[in-house]
């Protein structure tokens, strides 16, 4: 799609694409920055040959190579960013011809992902402004939990009232939890009545979750009473048969007013066995792909995480502006919406909004071949899972062909039998699932990897970012959750970058230079650890021993350092602010990025190594979405860092903070005592110290549960001592 191009069908415009105005200045700046980098590399090589600080200079050179590489990947995404707008009202004219829509919702643990949250997510999509009989919602429960099934059974009942209510009153918040807890509207009697019904259901579900079992008197729906008997004594989440339960059928179920049909709602918990691989979320999604192919086989698929409810009922029509455009559909794999989060603190202290990931880089990718897939809020063209646009890969059985027309009711006996069959844990043996068909296996970041492989097959994608967020989700709300999530991503990304499908080799070959290198920014994400750790310790230790690692302020190279670092930071800030971020938000973002460099990334490296050597079997650690610690919640809202667990992940950053503080004191002392000092080193150290202020606070001044544990502080002091002593041998 060329920039500035309008796409119209029969004279009505469906969508437009506008290049960003910053493109030209960015390209000009890139030329200067590149010259600067070349000069710096020359400087390093020259010093390496003429000076005798080989170790120090080699480490700096290595770091700067990584920084240069990362900057290049960002530059590729800054070459042609585009914004898009779409015109759903023009698309809505063809209501009759809307394609069927299958929605996939993933959940995996009723205690980390409260069933009520899953129910709300399901209700919010069932209530889309879209022909109800064309929507089918499939919930995949990897936790194999009767509690989740119970919540969905209740949701199905409630939806018969909720859906007509939303449509009649044109409610915008179609997640009942959001609607009933908002105070931006006045309450009618009908509202009150529905709210009561909702609260009733909520208390039943929460009661069941609390007691941990579904008692028979709670099961009001006779048709599905039997299914709960499947949870026998031998049933565990890692070992159980397939459960597929149709909770609502659009052919037979009407809403409360008997005017509208209801969407399909289907609960799926795939068969699990300890001895066969389940491939985490990618495996769950592939099961849904097959089960839905057997039951409804809709051409459009929306994937959602259970924590991402729909925040705008018109979203599917918006996606259709692209997915029904005959000019592009044959090559279009998916339409990705950004992940937006609710309840984020004012300045986002843990940088969990991921502005770079979900906004800034997205528009950059969109000007090339399209955004990467981020696991949720994405409308797929079903065909995209079956090989490249020009080269259809046949599934092993006819019933799974993406273009097959389904002509049997979803509850027909043989449909259900086949659905159970394709959800079996051994079904994928000797098939192309996970390698050539469906979501791709082999990494903990199935989303990134699947999108990447689709782009390698020369599929395209589109980024759609409407003003009103289309989906709202949950993000980590304490530090340990954040660093653990990031560690999982780091491991998953290393699994891609160091495989034979690395974007640097395979990617560049199959998608071209720009896309391939852009994809490297994530793939080599953990490599940020190298420059961060080197710059966090090396100049500081050198400072102790009066050794200069950077040019003196009188040298010309000094200005080069200032230009490159200020330039890179300023451009990062500019990206952030131009895409709607705040200055404080940016400050927090860069701080968290450097903290990850001392926690998630190095620990990700270690875990990846252990995994490769078969010494660890770490899987997919779910992020907890049950924030029920009130104290912790309060600290988060007040933007006070929460180090609340005594994890060794905090040790390197605590050590780094202490080393920098001592270095700063010592450096300033030298500067004052002798009137000359290592200016660049002191500037760097001061910047780090300012960034570390919350860490010092958590070490010394705080008494609450969120402070840095004594064990970590103690170890950090010892480690600092060891570093300083050993610094004598390699710095001097
Ligand atoms: O074995 C598993 C593990 C996870 N999930 C689901 O995967 C989703 C994402 O898990 P979450 O703990 O919320 O991880 P996040 O780090 O928040 O998720 C981001 O990163 C993941 C990849 O690591 C992507 O799958 C997600 O879409 C993306 O939002 C949830 O709906 C889970 O229920 C499963 O279905 N089966
Ligand atoms: Mn999540």
Image (cartoon, rainbow, N blue to C red):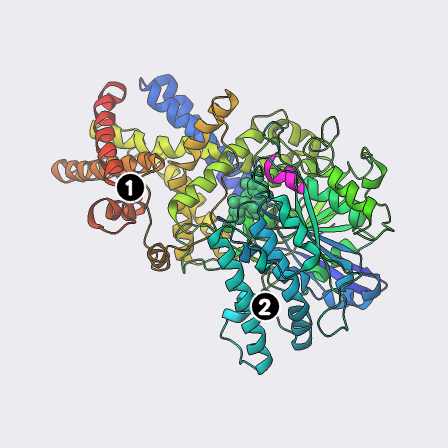
User: Which image quarter: residue 518?
Assistant: top right
User: Which image quarter: residue 270?
Assistant: top right
The quarter in which the C terminus is drawn is: top left
Residue 472 in picture, x, y percent from top left = 55, 58
The residue lying furthest to the front in this view is 217
Mark 2 residue element = loop
Residue 596 in picture, x, y percent from top left = 41, 39
N-terminal of the pair, mark 2 or mark 1, is 2
Q: Is residue 150 left or right of residue 596?
A: right
Mark 2 and mark 1: Cα distance apart in space: 49 Å
Mark 1 residue element = helix
Q: Which residue bears the numbered disc 2?
A: 173
The one nearer the camera, 31 or 647, is 647
Mark 2, mark 1: which one is toward the viewer? 2
Residue 493 in picture, x, y percent from top left = 54, 34
Q: Is residue 540 left or right of residue 676?
A: right
Alpha-carbon neighbours of circle 2 within 10 Å: few (<14), some, or many (≥20)?
some
The residue range painted magenta reads 278-285
Residue 55 in picture, x, y percent from top left = 34, 20
Residue 26 is at least partly visible in this image:
no
Q: Which residue bears the numbered disc 1?
A: 683
Question: Is the residue 171 above or below the residue 565 in the image?
Answer: below
Residue 222: numbered disc: none
Question: Is the residue 122 above or below the residue 428 in the image?
Answer: below
The answer to whether residue 36 is magenta is no
CB at disc 1 and ligand 1 closer than 8 Å: no
The one nearer the camera, 481 or 214, is 214
Alpha-carbon neighbours of circle 1 within 10 Å: few (<14), some, or many (≥20)?
few
Is the magenta region chiefly helix, strand or loop? helix
Residue 604 is at least partly visible in this image:
yes
């Amino acid at each position: 799609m060329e920039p500035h191009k309008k796409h119209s069908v029969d004279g009505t415009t469906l969508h437009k694409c506008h290049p960003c105005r910053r493109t030209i200045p960015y390209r000009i700046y890139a030329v200067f920055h590149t010259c600067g980098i070349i000069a710096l590399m020359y400087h390093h090589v020259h010093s390496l040959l003429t000076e005798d600080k080989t170790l120090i200079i080699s480490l700096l050179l290595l770091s700067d190579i990584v920084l240069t590489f990362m900057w290049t990947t960002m530059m590729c995404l800054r070459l042609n960013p585009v914004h898009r707008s779409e015109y759903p009202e023009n698309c809505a004219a063809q209501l009759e011809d809307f394609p069927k829509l299958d929605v996939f919702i993933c959940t995996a643990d009723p205690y980390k992902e409260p069933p009520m949250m899953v129910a709300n997510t399901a209700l919010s999509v069932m209530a889309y402004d879209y022909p109800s009989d064309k929507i089918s919602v499939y919930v995949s429960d990897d936790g194999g939990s009767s509690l989740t099934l119970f919540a969905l059974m209740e949701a199905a009942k409630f939806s018969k009232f909720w859906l007509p209510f939303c449509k009649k009153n044109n409610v915008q918040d179609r997640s009942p939890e959001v609607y009933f807890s908002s105070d931006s509207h006045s309450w009618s009697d009908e509202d009150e009545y529905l709210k009561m019904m909702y609260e009733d259901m909520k208390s039943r579900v929460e009661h069941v979750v609390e007691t941990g079992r579904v008692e028979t008197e709670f099961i009001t729906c006779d048709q599905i009473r039997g299914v709960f008997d499947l949870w026998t004594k031998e049933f565990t989440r890692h070992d159980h048969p397939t459960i597929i339960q149709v909770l609502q059928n659009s052919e037979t179920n009407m809403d409360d007013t008997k005017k509208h049909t209801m969407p399909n709602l289907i609960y799926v918990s795939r068969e699990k066995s300890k001895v066969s691989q389940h491939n985490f979320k990618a495996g769950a999604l592939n099961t849904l792909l097959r089960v839905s192919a057997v039951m409804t086989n809709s051409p459009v698929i929306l994937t959602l995480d259970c924590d991402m409810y729909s925040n705008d009922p018109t979203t599917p029509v918006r996606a259709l502006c692209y997915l029904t455009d005959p000019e592009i559909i044959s090559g279009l794999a998916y339409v990705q919406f950004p992940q937006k989060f609710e309840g984020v603190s004012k300045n986002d202290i843990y940088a969990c909004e991921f502005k770079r990931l979900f906004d800034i880089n997205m528009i950059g990718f969109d000007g090339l071949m399209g955004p990467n897939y981020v696991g949720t809020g994405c409308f797929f063209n079903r065909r995209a899972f079956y090989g490249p646009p020009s080269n259809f890969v046949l599934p092993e059985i006819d019933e799974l062909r993406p273009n097959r027309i389904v002509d049997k009711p979803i509850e027909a006996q043989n449909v259900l039998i086949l659905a159970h069959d394709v959800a079996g844990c051994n079904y994928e043996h000797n098939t192309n699932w996970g390698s050539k068909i469906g979501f791709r296996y082999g990494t903990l970041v199935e989303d990134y990897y699947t999108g990447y492989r689709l782009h390698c097959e020369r599929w395209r994608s589109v980024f759609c970012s409407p003003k009103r967020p289309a989906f709202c989700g949950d993000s980590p709300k304490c530090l340990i959750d954040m660093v653990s999530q990031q560690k999982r991503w780091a491991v998953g990304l290393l699994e891609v970058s160091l495989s034979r499908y690395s974007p640097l080799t395979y990617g560049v070959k199959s998608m071209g230079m720009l896309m391939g290198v852009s994809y490297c920014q994530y793939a080599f994400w953990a490599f940020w650890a190298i420059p961060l750790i080197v710059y966090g310790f090396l100049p500081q230790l050198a400072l102790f021993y009066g050794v200069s690692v950077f040019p003196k302020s009188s040298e010309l190279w000094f200005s080069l350092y200032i230009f490159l670092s200020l330039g890179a930071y300023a451009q990062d800030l500019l990206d952030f602010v131009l895409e709607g971020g705040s200055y404080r938000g940016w400050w927090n973002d860069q701080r968290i990025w450097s903290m990850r460099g001392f926690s998630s990334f190095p620990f990700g490296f270690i875990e990846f190594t252990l995994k490769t050597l078969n010494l660890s079997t770490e899987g997919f650690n779910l992020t907890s979405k049950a924030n029920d610690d009130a104290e912790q919640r309060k600290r988060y809202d007040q933007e006070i860092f929460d180090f609340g667990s005594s994890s060794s992940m905090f040790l390197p950053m605590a050590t780094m903070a202490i080393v920098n503080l001592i270095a700063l004191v010592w450096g300033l002392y030298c500067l004052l005592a002798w009137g000359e000092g290592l200016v660049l080193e002191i500037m760097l150290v001061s910047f780090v110290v300012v960034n570390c202020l919350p860490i010092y606070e958590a070490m010394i001044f705080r008494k609450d549960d969120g402070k840095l544990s004594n064990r970590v502080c103690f170890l950090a002091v010892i480690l600092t001592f060891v570093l300083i002593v050993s610094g004598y041998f390699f710095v001097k």
